[in-house]
Image (cartoon, helix red, strand yellow):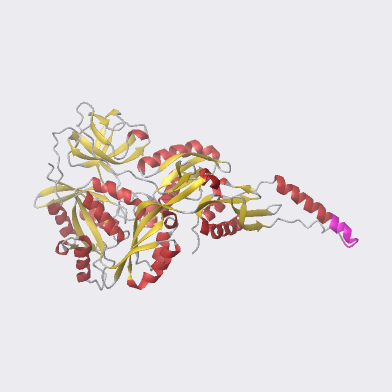
Amino acid sequence: MNQSTRNFCIIAHIDHGKSTLADRFIQRAHMVSEREFHDQMLDSMPIERERGITIKSQAVSIPYRVNGTEYHLNLVDTPGHVDFTYEVSRAICSCEGALLLIDATQGVEAQTLSNFYLALEQDLEIIPVINKTDLPGIDYDWLAEQIDRDLGLDPERAIRVSAKHGTGMDELLEAIVHQVPAPDGSAGDPLRGLIFDSAYDPYRGVVIHLRVFEGAVAPGMPIRFWSTDGSHVVEETGTFGVGTTQRTAELKAGDVGYLIAGVKRIGDARVGDTVTRADLPCERPLDGFRDVKPVVFASVYPVDADDYAEFNAALDRLALNDAALTYEKDSSAALGFGFRCGFLGMLHLEIVQERLEREFDLAVIVTVPTVRYRVVLNDGTERFIDNPLDYPDPGHIEYSEEPFIRASIITPTAYVGAVIKLCLDRRGVQNTMNYLDERRVEMTYDMPLAEVVYEFYDTLKSVSRGYASFDYELTDYHASHLVRLDILLNGRPVDALAQLVFSDSARQRAGEICRRLKDEIPRHQFKVPIQGAVGSQIIARETVSAVRKDVTAKCYGGDITRKRKLLERQKEGKKRMKQIGDVQLPKSAFLAVLKPPSD
């Protein structure tokens, strides 16, 4: 057992101050100079700092001395958004303790509860921390009641801090040392380490982020990956600093760090795999992580078809760093070759798209996102459909089902009416409605996942002025009447714009798409009809007017029949152009279709 090591993570609802608290820990340990310090030190991607959110779990080893003993506090900062719960679960598996951050003005919120239960499942020591105590008008009795009733924790143990001003840091660090248990495991046992993340170095290959549970690993040691059975020799081991790494002689039981072993193939180092010695393997692998299941699917294509090979390599590298991303090859008549990708939500999709464009300098087009539906055919065959082009002929379908979620919403009582209306508009069915206290209401709804992935979270924040919190879990499939909505340009279907929609919403959705495309498609030499169709039935239409040359400008008086003849000749010419002309569809048109349906 490593008595001087503590492994802990920070978990909380979004915007409760996790990254700010990590910044204060780093400053308290004097790990960077004041000149080098900046906010969100552990957020390594520019997109994280710009959006003010954490996307990737980041680890750092913080030195802390108390009573003459030097401790190594291995901190893992986690995301707060519901789309990145998988990152939180991986961080929790690498720790013995967790700081559960509670906003002093907001109290216990939906994602606070969700992450609390994740930590309980792993039997972590949970320390409640009340943050933002520098704000005026805080009701500590109300917070204590929530911690006791909602979380079942002792409110007397809750530590009051202000991550913004750095107050309460020493008390919190001492609580980590004394309350978080030292890691189990002996350095003399056979090596068992869990891969919880990885990154790619173009010069040294895959950099494996590892939590060692038993044994030790050092340079020169032969290791084996349990699931792939690949063997390698360790070249370097070390721990994580702030924006850098620190080489060490070994990583022993209880340590969190990295190893480099000349792994060149990205698929060899799988997140959740067990690392052991090749010459003295352990008896059984570690449990790893729960399987991640994508809930939103979309096809991604490079704008320039010549970038396909580079695009393929970029997705390989991105998937190494983002284990929740899944992809397989796809093609489109309109957009060429690309990949069908699976995401954990719409924010996850946006982040992946931005990372492809920023980190790999690739311009990409994303098709309309959809969820995975279940279709039962007349012969009893069951199929899962996540691509509208694979949707069978309606005459062959016995019935179709769509995935539902159990949504948990905590909102102040003043916004109950607005939240109920939003959920009803999204086809939600209320299950429970509990008044947690005189200020807050918890509501649970069964809702179609397809109605939630399109900006539901942002709309909820808007109608509740930012006070409502939201979390969800997938439940089961329920029968639904689905139709495939095709978009036709100049009478020709564009496969990249097709989507599966609820039948009652098809006409409204088709009308919105047609209106948006009309604003984005440039005018041609001929009229361009934009149509929304379900099967052979046209349910919406807009028309882009033709660019018309004034062919009668050269006629100065004379017989009217001469002007008519010129206009008829122009009309015939435009008719021929319409039959053979191609409509230019700009990238902005695809982005316009991606916008959520207006309420």
Q: Which residue in the rendered view is the most extreme toward the right?
A: 558
- Residue 187 lies left or right of residue 45; in this view the side is left
Which residue is located at x 36 percent, y 31 percent?
264
In the rendered image, the quadrant that contains the N terminus is top left
Nearer to us in this view, 49 or 529: 529
Q: Which residue in the rendered view is the most extreme toward the front?
A: 379
* Residue 45 screen position, x and y as percent: 37, 49
Nearer to us in this view, 134 or 486: 486
Q: In the picture, residue 541 is in which quadrant?
A: bottom right
Q: Is residue 357 visible?
A: no
Q: In the picture, residue 114 is in which quadrant?
A: bottom left
Q: Is residue 564 magenta?
A: yes
Which residue is located at x 71 percent, y 55 percent?
547
* Residue 286 screen position, x and y as percent: 23, 38
Magenta residues, start to end: 556-565
Which residue is located at x 19 percent, y 34 percent?
191
Q: Which residue in the rendered view is the most extreme toward the left?
A: 67
Our reading of the magenta stretch's main secondary structure is: helix
Nearer to us in this view, 507 or 153: 507
* Residue 455 screen position, x and y as percent: 44, 58
- Residue 596 lies left or right of residue 211; in this view the side is right
Q: Is residue 362 above or below residue 125?
A: above
Q: Is residue 333 above or below residue 166?
A: above
Q: In the picture, residue 13 is in which quadrant?
A: bottom left
* Residue 379 screen position, x and y as percent: 48, 41
